[in-house]
Image: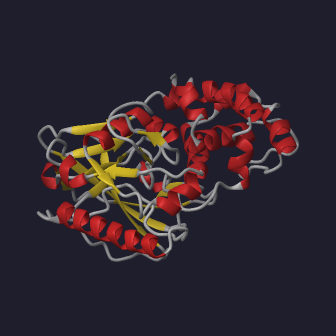
Amino acid sequence: MDTVSMMLGSPRGRFFCANIGNACSTHELASRYGLHSTLGDVVDVLANVDFGAVAALSEIEILDRFAYAVDFARYWQPPDEEDIVLVVPQVVELLRPIAHAVLASPHTQWWAEPVDLVNQRMVQKYERTDDPDVTPLHIRKFEDGLEQWRTHTLDYEATFVEYLKADPDRQIGGEWWSIPAANGAYDTTRARDVLGAIELMLVEDSPGWSFAHVWPVSVHRTPRVYEISSPADWAHLVDTYPLAVPASRRSVWYDTTGEYHDWFIPDWSKVVNDYDAVHLSMIGYLTTPGITIPLSARSGATVLAGWNPDTTFWLNTSFITVDGNMTAWRPNSENLWAPV
């Protein structure tokens, strides 16, 4: 399947394309932010896109529209009204030329690239605008971090199995993510000329931080990096290192996909035997999260959830160190991150 079709098969891809269309439409209902939830209004806005305006968007403007799509990612509840409208075939076809146009921009040509090992950054975010104490970051190695994660995941799954034994129809929320949320598993994103780190802008369900420190990260030797650029890449990772979580993800992933399956996530304690890091490309983000992804090596499916765009999770931290040349960033008057 081509990249545009995969984007339009993904809720985050559709939302991003709609944001671009909304920002570049000549219709009176168009606005920089905010999508209309009625089908008629969405069609009117997207049918009047100025594709010259799409081509003229700067990189920071494109990332701004991307950020709005990322912020509305939800993997623990049913789709929003906007997401429901954007899956209508008539709307999908209006999004198609928008997707082609934005992917033709010179500012998006790196979106399918693998991890940029030369320009990785780690971000500390703060809620206050007053200057916090500058505490140098140190990468600490936790020998049993991923094993602890696996033990917790299996114990958590066992708890939900008991819940369902007591009441098979019970709908109960819980952990919805499929990332390596373990002690010692650090995450980084790349720097761009217009932005100190992609993580400054592209963060799911962002609480709205008002200040940040960005630290350069040096990558040593040649780490083994698994790249996720499509649903097939994620499915292969899960098929190769499966960990069954059908009870604990039953309700939350039903809410986000509308389907019940025998759900699986990667067993990160096994992935680290073959890979030192795992990177989700920008295109990978626009095509993969929040959808049911069938597995081929077993009867079941998986969902990529909780992974921000261009983020690399480091399962083996011996390959990275934090440098001391920190820079401070905060949102400007246009609510775009800028150096202080």
Foreground pick, 57 / 165: 165
Q: How is the image coloured?
A: secondary structure
Q: Quadrant where the C terminus lies?
A: bottom left
Foreground pick, 236 / 225: 236
> Residue drawn 47% across and 35% down?
283
Give the x, y percent position of residue 32: 72, 48
Foreground pick, 71 / 160: 160
Q: Is residue 71 visible?
A: no
> Residue drawn 63% across and 60% down?
333
Left or right: 315 in relation to 130: left
Number of disc labels: 0
Left or right: 197 in relation to 169: left
> Residue drawn 57% across and 54% down?
256
Quadrant assignment, res 63: top right
> In the rendered image of this protein, does residue 133 appear above or below residue 220?
below
Give the x, y percent position of residue 233: 36, 35
> In the rendered image of this protein, does residue 149 appear above or below residue 99?
below
Q: Is residue 178 visible?
A: yes
Foreground pick, 67 / 255: 255
> In the rendered image of this protein, does residue 161 appear above or below residue 91?
below
Quadrant assignment, res 144: bottom left
Give the x, y percent position of residue 267: 26, 52
> In the rendered image of this protein, does residue 53 appear above or below residue 169?
above
